Amino acid sequence: MKIKLLIWALILPLSALAQPTQPFASQRPGLTPGGCAWLVPWGMEYAQPKQLLPSEVAAKNARGCLSQFDAYYGSNGCPLKYCNYKDIGE
């Protein structure tokens, strides 16, 4: 029993590292009212990064990530993915 617990204690942290950066994106079909793909699950619409004007994208992406809730944007102004923790401040 202790060996099983030890194995689980070692495996669980490693499995957390293997999670995709957008775990809920495939669970929420459809588009936002602005026509962007959802990055958040149902009920968390408030956490969806806002859509930018296409003219603002280059400057925003050049500034980098300010937090984990910040996003990288595509040329159409839609958020593509959340920033990784390691990207903050770069």
Image (tube, rainbow, N blue to C red):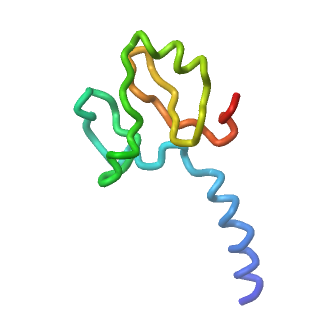
Residue 71, relative to residue 41: is it above or below?
above
Q: Quadrant of residue 52?
A: top left
Left or right of residue 30: residue 13: right
Residue 13, relative to residue 41: is it above or below?
below
Which quadrant would the C terminus be assigned to in this image? top right
Q: Nearer the viewer, residue 83 or 23?
A: 83
The spot of residue 85 in percent (x, y) is 65, 42
Write the residue at 22% across / 32% down. 33
Taking the view exactly as shown, the residue that stands out farthest to the top is 55
Which quadrant would the N terminus be assigned to in this image? bottom right
Residue 20, relative to residue 76: is it above or below?
below
The spot of residue 45 in percent (x, y) is 32, 46
Write the residue at 50% across / 32% down. 71
The spot of residue 82 in percent (x, y) is 51, 37
Left or right of residue 67: residue 44: left
Write the residue at 77% across / 83% down. 3
Taking the view exactly as shown, the residue that stands out farthest to the bottom is 1
Q: Quadrant of residue 29?
A: top left
The spot of residue 62 in percent (x, y) is 60, 17
The number of numbered discs placed on residues in the rendered structure image is 0
Q: Nearer the viewer, residue 75 or 10?
A: 75
Write the residue at 40% across / 40% down. 39
